Amino acid sequence: MKLQDKIAIITGGTHGIGAETAMALAREGVGIALVARNAGDGQIQKRIESLGVPCAVFVADLQREEECMGIVEEVYKKLGNIDILVHSAGSAAPGGLLNGARDVWYQAFDIHVHAAFHLCRAVVSYMKKRDGGAIILISSAAGLRGVKNSLAYAVVKGAIPQFTRALAFELSDHNISVNCVSPGVIRTRFQDYLTPEQVQNNIKNRIPLHKEGTPEDVASVICALIKNEFITGENIVIDGGMTMRIV
C-alpha cells in the first residue's frame, strides 16, 4: 500500500506502541486518528501535526460495542476516509484460574478480542469503498506460550493470531490485508510493574539478544506489513528470540 494521504485509526494511540506507530505512519504521510480512553496531554497530536499531516484525537471506551462502532463513524466524518486500522489498545489481566477475578477475564476479552471484532466490522465497509485496506492487530509473546498468573491475558492474546488468519481469508477478495504482531518484552509503561531483578533476569536469561525491545522495533514491523501488499494472515513475533528457545 502506498501510504501517502491514507487515513489510519490507531487505538491506544497516545502512548507506547500505538503512539510510536502513529508517528511512524505520519512520517510516511498518513493522516492519523488517535483513539484512547482519555485525550492525554496532546503532545502526540502536536508532533504528528508538525509533520504536516492531519491528526485528531477521539476518546472512547473500546470495551463497549457501541463506542467501537460509533468512533469509526466519527473518524470517517472527521477525516474523510479509513484505510488502516491498528488495534493497539489493551491492558494487563493478572490472575490465574482460582485467584483471578471473574471481571478481569471478561474485561480482557472485551478490550482485546471483542473490540477487535467490532472495530473490524466497522472499518471494513469503508475499506471496501476504497478497494482495499490494511488491518493490524496486536497479540503478544504471552499468547504463544503458557504464562503463569496471567491466564486471561495469555488466552486473549492467543486468540488474536487465529482471528487474524480467519479474517484475512475472509477479506482477501476485497484486497484487505489482515496481519498481527506479537511483541515480547517491550520497554513501555506496560513493563513498569517489573522489579529491577525481573528486568535483569529477562535480559540475562530469558531474551537471547540480551536486551528489551522498543516501541520503535514494533512500529517498524507494523509499517512494513501495511506497506507490503503480498502479506496477509501472518503473525510476526518481535521478542528478541524469547519464544523460539528451548532453554
Image: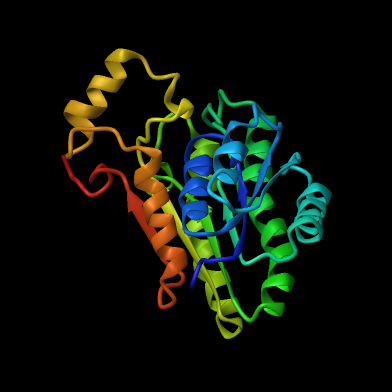
Would residue 32 be visible to someone looking at this image?
yes
Q: For the C terminus, which image quadrant?
A: top left
**Where is residue 67 drawn, in percent x and y?**
80, 47
**Where is residue 212 drawn, in percent x and y?**
29, 33
Residue drawn 72% across the image and 57% down it: 118
Left or right side of 202 for 184: right
Residue drawn 51% across the image and 66% down it: 3
Residue drawn 17% across the image and 27% down it: 204
Q: Point out the residue furthest to the top here.
A: 196
Q: Classify residue 44 by image quadrant.
A: top right
- Depth check: 96 or 87 in front? 87
Would residue 145 be visible to someone looking at this image?
no
Q: Classify residue 105 by image quadrant.
A: top right
Residue 23 sits above or below residue 125 on the image: above
- Depth check: 172 or 224 in front? 224
Rendering colour mode: rainbow
**Where is residue 143 drawn, in percent x and y?**
43, 47
Residue 181 sits above or below residue 193 on the image: below
Residue 85 sits above or below residue 186 on the image: below
